[in-house]
Amino acid sequence: MGAPLVLDNVQSLPFIGPELTLGAGILLLLVWELVAHGARKRVGLLAIMFATLGAAGAQAAFALAHDAPAVSLFGGLLASDGFAHVFRVLFAFVTAVVALYAAPVRADDALPGKRSTGEMYLLLLTVALGLSFMAMSRHLLMIYLSIEIVSVISFVLAAFSIDDKKSSEGALKYVIYGGVASGIMLYGMSWLYGATQSLALPEIGARVAAMSAAQHGVPPVVFLATVCMLAGFGYKISAAPFHMWTPDVYEGAPTPVTAFLSVGPKAAGFAVLVRFFAEALRATGSLHASPWPLVAGVLAMLTMTVGNLSAIGQDNVKRMLAYSSIAHAGYMLLGFAVFSTTGTAAIVFYALTYCLMNLGAFLVVLALAEQNGGDESVGAFRGLGTRAPVLAACMAVFLFSLTGLPPFAGFVGKFYLFAALVRGGGNFTWLVATVGVLNSVVSLFYYARVLRSMYLTPAGASDAPVVVARRHTATAIALAVPTVALGVYWAPLYDLVARTVGMVP
Amino acid sequence: MPEFTGPVQHVELSTTLWLIALLPLLGSVTNAIFGRRLQKSHFGHDLAHKLHIGSLGVTLVAVGAMLAAFALSLWHVAKLLALPEAHRFLFCHAWEMVRIGSVDFGFDFALDPLSSVMILIITGVGTLIHVYAAAYMHHDGAYWRFFAYLNLFVFSMLLLVLGDGFMVMFFGWEGVGLCSYLLIGFWYDDYAKASAGMKAFVTNRVGDWGFVTGLMLLFWALGGAWLEGGSYQPDNLPRLAAVAVESGEAEHGGHEAGGEHGAVTAKAHDADGDDAVGHHAKAAHPQGNGTFDFTVLPGAKVYVDGALAGISPLTGKSLHAGRHTLRVVPGGGTDDLEIPSFSVEAGGETMVSLIGPALSFRSLHDQLVVRDAAGHHTVREGLQSKKAWGGVGVITLACLCLFLGATGKSAQIPLFVWLPDAMAGPTPVSALIHAATMVTAGVYMIARLSWLFALSPVASGVVALVGALTALFAATIGLYQYDIKKVLAYSTVSQLGFMFIGVGVGAYWAGVFHLMTHAFFKACLFLGSGSVIHGMHAVVHGEAAAQDMRKMGGLKRVMPITSRTYFVACLAITAAPFPLFAGFWSKDEILWRAFTTENIALVPGALIYAIGLAAAACTSFYMWRSYYLTFEGEHALPKIATEVHESPAAITWVLVVLAALSTVAGVLFGFSTHLLGGHGEPMLEEWLSPVLQHAVVSFREGGLGLEYALMALSVGLAIASWALAKKRYGAGRPADWAAREEGLPLFDAIQHKYWVDEAYGAAIIGPILKLRLVLADLDKWAIDGIVNGAGVVGRAAAWTSGAIDHHLVDGAVNFVADRTFAAGERLRTVQTGRIQSYLYGLVGGVLFFACLGYFLGR
């Protein structure tokens, strides 16, 4: 409570331990990639990767567990608070899981396109660093820089399979689209800077509040600036109508990268979005005070509807999951639209559950495609219930959870999102909630297609058991178990999230 | 906020209570996973053979889990005994499930005198029946599956009685229903048996609908039952109230209260030693301190005067006398709760109660007994004043709905039809589930909610009347059954009716007493019949033949122990001619209370009494008929003399123990010096009084003379019926006894169980099946049309969206891609291309939101 503690550059260093760890890991990985060879190289890569992520995640988790006081770092560039810590832990976890997906099985295994695993790990760690900064930024410059770190590296990751036309094509679109979106966002930032003469979110917040009070409403210049910035944020979380890059990039990119993009940058985008609206705009859930609940509500409704309706017709499971990830961004926007701490807690909780189930679903696609020569269509899942019972059961868990059925984590997450929304009160929130519920129903349709294919359609010609790499099965189980467990016993996690989502005042 | 006082429930914390329920679950899981392998292995094969039981491994797991649960139950009941009367309430918070808004649902367990009676019956009789089943089922191929189910049943039943709230009880309620279904249809390859299981399950769904509806009504009704500054707050949120505890001990003088206080304070020092820093100076003067308990919302953080006092449940915290503030952070999605100011009196005890919608029995109970500063039962009066649908009290409505749930589980009119069919299950199942435990769940629920049912004389009257009618109705059906298990099944329905008379007329303890004695003697009877059936398989083939009393006769000579225990149990259930066996005590108490009750509004107590008396007379007749036909007289089949033998020790010993319990339990728990002119109360009544004392009930003073006269009347009638049964079916019965029976009036109707099943079939099941055809047609034409219409619309939307994706997005992409890649891998040429459409979307989105702001003018 009271005035925020602002630390200078030297004082701040201990608070960015996780980021310093990631930086050290990047350098180490770079050197190892150059000097080591053979089996030692593979072991070393894995060791450096997981040690770095483990150490970074553990530091953030430690801060979280000890309710470390919220402070402002580097004279107000970054925030070290519970909200950031939760995301830092999440990013370390997601990166580690994706690294596991991309891990080479044998020493001479190269990733698609003859690129080395070390290269991918290096890029992944760098993105993780950018993601952490995104979650911590409370300064327009830092927001822009961290988003660009993540974007630029994501372009490279999306194009990782250099021989794959789809991959290259998607990446190119990503670059162009990302560039324009960043440009529009930067344009909005310049407006905001012009109007408030500050880049620091708290100061912007104070000035905007003063201007709004003087004009009895949000000034048009702030509104326009925010809408422009929304293009940048919306592109990061793939919210409609800023989502069009998503299907192509997700389909084209190597599956581990897709899994990563659908979870990591999306969650970070939400972190920036929530922090920006809370600190710079001091948005409240009241529809009369500001246009933000309306904008956010419309954004949520559009995103859910576009994502779900487009997913229906998809035959490629990866592309279907891409659209489904758009829909899930829409669900998370439900919690955003009320601008309350319960809403924020619900978003964070949903992001945690979503990361489990979505990573899991992509893993199953990956494991299956590895076995059948890259077939990612719904047909590839035929008879999986008998051909690979464990994997199919895990996939069923992920899909049910994504649909939001009890007793799975997705249901609980969605429940809290809707609860937060309805508690916001007012007719508009009911409208948004209704659209959300209808969308959940639609989503069952395309998830159920995969389920039907796995369990109800006979395998046909190829009913031989699918032999999946053991580590994939193990990872799938490791993700499915918490998906079920959090659907039954989630109180401690939710309490932790609800307690720690506080930001630097 | 007004100050409150009231006799709210003290809570003693326990960390081990949940283990009682866990043990049978572990047994079940172990047998479910390893049972098949255990059964196939040769582990303990010789010993098992010698003992005439099935696989030793499976048996050890199942019976071991039961024995351990029984021992643990005994230990917890002993702990309960050691506590002063008002403190007999062990509470254990296992884990929190959902807490959002006003819904608070955690896995909380509670043991009070009422549930202690239940767990002793469940684990005690349960253990005996497990031992019995080890011998009874020893040939069965799915021996392991049977025990996995049976242990799972015990687990569910323990959840049902140990739950400290409706939700855990409901988990148990559904769990026992599931296990009952699984075990009735245990031999599922027999279609009749499988469908009997289905019938039980479906019938119970109707009851469950009532249960859930009643629960929701109650929850909803309590939402606004709170007066703040004289007005209702209809927001359905719980509030907190500090209640000064009125303890029973205070009346007994200072000695006990002082000792109590000292004990509690001492515990406070162990528990939160360093929390009470600010109060240490005061703690030196205990008379300046009061104790503070916070036991609602388990897991919540409790702040007293701004400092963290601990995590709920929190008992015996010492606070200095005076005013304090309280803030509670429940966590989950529930807002913080506050009491801005409450007072603690020196030497007094202050507890915090939850007021408003609650799922926990204790919270429900506590808020109904608290009084505000003016001496009004604010919440109770608020609840009582709520009317719905033309002036029916909400309490009455909720109680009736809950009773509907009870009629399903406890096989009362109109939902009793499943129980006789449930006899298709193996006999130990009939004894455990369909006689001793599960079917008494409804009785238990009403006793548990006694303070609620007592508030509604109308609902209580309905309970008593339905109970009485069921008792008579089922007893008459029992008169001419030939299947020995069917006789016992109808007898069970009838005896459950007696229990409902008890809890209906306000004699809750008597209902529970009969529940207990019935558990002993009916288990003994069922297991005795099982022993007979087991033996009869040597001479006849098929389940139906082995249970047919017309094929038995004279079994006394070949199965002496079985026949003697059956005889004792018959004495216990019929109370004739020696009015000392268990059933007499409980049944007579129920009938006496029915005669003198003043709690059942419109229904005259004497009518209930008369019906009950008639049912008791019938009981005596059909029980002795079954005894004589089975055990006395000539062998119906000559081979019986040589080929039927007494059952193995595992079976006979269990019978002997149960027979002994049937003999002594009545006197032990039901005798009071009051019958000899003294003032004592029966032991069980005293034991249960902390639970049941808040039910406000009253009985007319009848006088000892009248009580003896009515007792003599019921015993006399029972003896007369016995004499009649002996004359017709005794050792010297005429050979054509069956034919003679058929000539009796009403025989046809009774034989066909008054055509109730047929009536249900014609009135409900048939129309539903017909409706199904109509609906199928409707479905084909109307619903499908709507669905297809919706599908078309959905498809159109999807098509549009897909078309955008396909033509605009993919088209652009493919177009770009085709051009580029066809031209050779000159990626650099794809600079502007059709990515434009994406970017149009992007810019269009920005414009759209900008316009949104513009037109809204903000």
Image: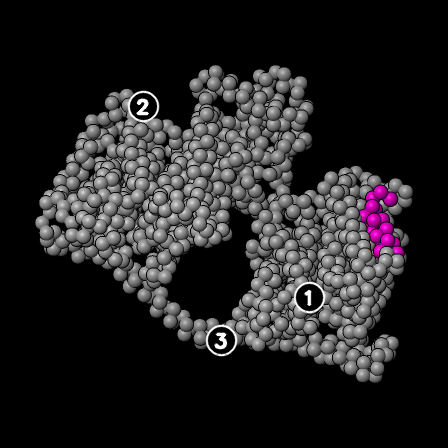
Chain letter of disc 2 in the image: B
Classify mark 2: residues with Cα within 10 Å, few (<14), some (14-19) or many (20+).
few
Task: Give the alpha-carbon distance from disc 1 to disc 3, as whole Å.
Answer: 40 Å
Task: Give the alpha-carbon distance from disc 2 to disc 3, as whole Å.
Answer: 73 Å
* Amino acid on which the number 3 mark rests in the picture: Gly
Left or right, residue B353 beside residue A216? left
User: In the rendered structure, does residue A21 fall within the stretch colored magenta?
Assistant: yes
Considering the whole magenta stretch, tell me its main secondary structure.
helix
Chain letter of disc 1 in the image: A
Q: Is residue A358 above or below residue B339?
A: below
User: In the rendered structure, does residue B436 fall within the stretch colored magenta?
Assistant: no
Discs 2 and 1 carry the same chain letter: no
Residue B721: percent from left, percent from top: 15, 41
Residue that mark 2 sits on = B680
Q: Secondary structure at mark 2?
A: loop
**In the image, which is nearer the foreground, mark 1 or mark 3?**
1
B835, A220: nearer the viewer: B835
